[in-house]
Image: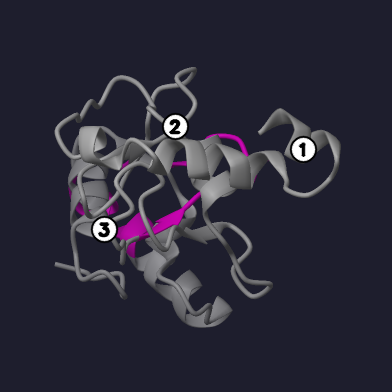
Amino acid sequence: MALQVINQKSDPITIHQKTLARFKELWLKIYDNTSCFSCLSRAPEDTLDCHHSLCTQCTRTHGTSTLQEPWTFYVAKCPLCCERNYTTFAHKPDTAGIRAIIAEGGGVRGIIPLAFLKELQAVIDLPIAIQEHFDIAVGSSSGKSTNNRWRFGRANTVQVH
């Protein structure tokens, strides 16, 4: 197999996928959520329909994305057991940090951040909910309640309760 890579008859990823597929009967019995069995070097973050898990790098290596959604990856089949996969995985760009929003306010003031987010969502009119732009929402007092209402409301709109 190394000669195939050296002679440029095949790329390393294809060779790796063929090697993993040779043991697919064994992979059907082995599952772990602490190690990516594709690379054996990172913790998995994405779980396929067959319940095997891949790390971010292996999802990108074995998956495909589109120009319209370059950070959404689709892995057509599990590289381990070769079963079909229908789940897509949204990844943050490598240059993105943690995206946080903080809503503070007590009593009646607690409604102001939520109303602001609702208005912001209406004005920018993006194809995804504004909640999807943040990894974590933090608040105290009614700010905490605001974040819970905002994060767990309907997926496509900010709701005022």
The answer to whether any part of residue 106 appears in the image is: no
Of circles 3 and 2, the one toward us is 2
Label 3, secondary structure: give it: helix
| Residue at the image point whose x is 42% and y is 59% from the top | 132
Q: Point out the residue furthest to the right here.
A: 7
Q: Quadrant of the C terminus?
A: bottom left
Numbered mark located on residue 159 in the image:
none
Please provide the residue range marked out in magenta. Answer: 88-114
Determine if the magenta segment contains residue 50: no
Amino acid type, mark 3: Trp
What separation in Å lies between label 3 and label 1 (alpha carbons)? 51 Å
Q: Which residue is mark 2?
A: 38
| Crowd around label 2: few <14 · some 14–19 · many ≥20 (10 Å) | many
Cα gap from disc 3 to disc 2, whole angstroms: 37 Å
Mark with earlier residue (3, 2): 2
Mark 3 surroundings: few (<14), some (14-19) or many (≥20) residues within 10 A: many
Residue drawn at x 50%, y 44% is: 18
- Picture residue at 43% right of the left edge, 37% below the top: 20
Q: Earlier in the sequence, mark 3 or mark 1?
A: 1
Identify the amino acid type marked 1.
Answer: Val
How far apart are the alpha carbons under marks 1 and 2?
19 Å
| SS at mark 2 in the image | loop
Disc 1, SS: helix
Residue 27 visible here: yes
Q: Amino acid at mark 2?
A: Ser
Q: Quadrant of the N terminus?
A: top right
Q: Is residue 77 left or right of residue 133?
A: left
Vertical comparison of 72 with 92: above or below = below
Q: Nearer the viewer, residue 50 or 102?
A: 50
Residue 77 in picture, x, y percent from top left: 38, 58
Residue 5: mark: 1
Question: Which mark is drawn over residue 150?
Answer: 3
